Image: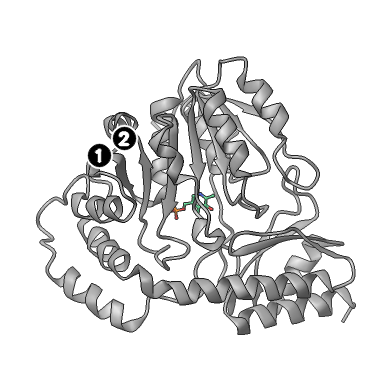
Amino acid sequence: MDCVRASAPQLQGLVPYDPKYLPAEAMLSANENPRDVEDSIREEIAREVAAVALNRYPDPLANDLRDLIAEANGLTREQVLIGNGGDELLFNIALAWGGAGRRMLNLPPTFSVYAANARLTGTEVVNIPRLEDFSIDEDAVLERLGAGDIDIVVITSPNNPTGECAREEFIQRVLEATDALVLVDEAYFEFARRSVLSYLAEHKNLIVLRTFSKAYSLAGVRMGYVMAHSDVIRELIKVRQPYSVDAVSQAIARVVFANRASFEARIDEIIAERGRVMEALAAIPGVKPYPSDANYILFAVEGADQAWAYLYDRGVLIRDFSSSAMLEGTLRASIGTPEQNDAFLAALEDFVSGK
Ligand SMILES: *Cc1c(COP(=O)(O)O)cnc(C)c1O
């Protein structure tokens, strides 16, 4: 047969995720930590990895890592689940709480993975667009939840790509207004130094997602986790692939998590640089940066798509959202090292002044 029947109907018209990840001197497109894991920690990783039995299946649930994360957050092992990146856990949440006849409340513009997962799992997406300044239309969300037919609510805090945290009082009201599973995606919480994790104690419908990819310099390793009521975690375990988190990644993440205090200085540096880049952007005529609690800044600029290409020619790769719905005319720059941020700002200044 030199032909094949069509794939599943939910795939028709779907475009594969493309991070538009190109080689560049200053990689400021994917919100990674600009600094790799430091050498002393890498040596410890090398020792741990050398001791991994490669012929044996890994611990399916990564219980040693679960225990470390649980203890650090005052939880039990049963309230934590490890995934192959936060992305895998997002898919598991869509599998377990979505599906045909189920609805997900989404607050665009936001991370595109939620809507893609909904589509793959046949979950209906109910969009409540953000307001002009990208803050959440809180009244509209609470009113919509009142209908009682939403199964998952996704609140990204800080929101990607727009940058700001959701208001804590709002999240609290959402948790009280619905029995839907409320996913608070805290992939960037280390840069906001704010979390809603404490609400777990009284709200069985809360699930908090975190990742090692951003603050902890491990985007290459694929390691994320969720924290929720043990009954919620149990449902997620039903849908997950048993061995998705490999033994090498488990070993690496254990070492990094045990050494997490040593990442604080570089997180502080990124937060300080974010302030500096924000001020510099605001001072460029015609550039409008949006406030950020994360390690990136979204900004609007005239001729955004040309600006993106100009920056790329200058060795600076940022993320182009200029033709994305609700983000027209915007670009997103991750906060890099001071030198990378300088290269980004200098190139953007030159673009704006027509050099
Ligand atoms: C980066 C990111 C994640 C998770 O990324 P992983 O690398 O898969 O852990 C989750 N949510 C948002 C909003 C992100 O930006």
Q: Is residue 201 left or right of residue 312?
A: left
x%, y% of residue 273? 63, 75
Element type where label 1 sits in the image: helix
Asked whether the viewer can see residue 12, the reply is no
Up-down: is 344 above or below 170? below
Ligand 1 within 8 Å of disc 2? The answer is no
Q: Residues within 10 Å of mark 2 (few under 14, many from 20)?
A: some
Amino acid type, label 2: Ile
Q: Which residue is mark 1?
A: 78
Q: Quarter of the image containing the N terminus?
A: top left
x%, y% of residue 323? 75, 50
Q: Which mark is residue 233?
A: 2
* Chain-order first, disc 2 or disc 1: 1
Measured Cα–Cα span from mark 2 to mark 1: 7 Å
User: Nearest the camera: 178 or 240?
Assistant: 178
Q: Is residue 27 left or right of residue 180?
A: right
Element type where label 2 sits in the image: helix
Amino acid type, label 1: Glu
x%, y% of residue 90? 44, 40
x%, y% of residue 28? 60, 69
Q: Are marks 2 and 1 in contact (CB under 8 Å)?
A: yes
Q: Is residue 94 left or right of residue 142?
A: left
Q: Name which residue lies at 38% across and 75% down.
A: 262
Q: Quarter of the image containing the C terminus?
A: bottom right
Q: How is the image coloured?
A: one colour
